[in-house]
Image: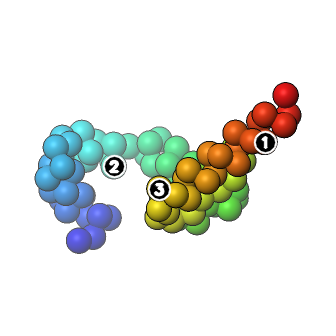
Amino acid sequence: RDIGVAAALGELADGVGWSADAVAAVAADASALQRVRTEASKASASGISGVPHAQIGGEALHGAQPVSAFAAALTRATARAAEAE
């Protein structure tokens, strides 16, 4: 479905329990659109090219990752924090 079409976006929103009217209002709000574009530009400039994306202790995890990858990143971040103390 083309989420650029307001009716399709509203139907998808409604299907997951969001208000189709509220989603349509945000989609039609030029300032909200500008905020999204600004945040997307910041993300792109910082190397984020997709979702999901997580930053853990300065380390980036791109794309879907197994739990073990998050656990390892948390372990490394904890070790770095302990060394810095």
Above or below 71: residue 21 = above
Quadrant holding the C terminus: top right
**Residue most extreme to the top:** 85
* Quarter of the figure with residue 82: top right
| Between 39 and 51, the one nearer to me in the picture | 51
Q: Quarter of the image holding residue 79?
A: top right
Quadrant assignment for the N terminus = bottom left
- Report the amino acid beneath label 2: Ala
**Residue type of the residue flagged with mark 1:** Arg
Name the colour scheme: rainbow
Residue under the image location 65 percent in, 46 percent down: 75
> Mark 2 or mark 3, which is nearer the start of the sequence?
2
Q: Residue at x 24, y 58 (%)?
A: 9
Q: Residue 80 shows which numbered tag?
A: 1
Task: Label 3, secondary structure: give it.
Answer: helix
- Residue at mark 1 to residue at mark 2: CA–CA distance: 42 Å
Residue 17 locus on image (x, y percent): 16, 43
Q: Nearer the viewer, mark 1 or mark 2?
A: 1
**Which residue has dot 2 on it?**
27
Residue at the location (45% across, 49% down)? Answer: 33
Are the residues flagged by discs 3 and 1 in contact, CB closer than 8 Å?
no
Residue depicted at x 56% and y 50%: 71
Q: How many marks?
A: 3
Mark 1 and mark 2 lie on one chain; the one further toward the N terminus is 2
Location of mark 3 (residue) = 67
The percent coordinates of residue 16 (x first, y second) are 18, 49
69 to the left or right of 75: left
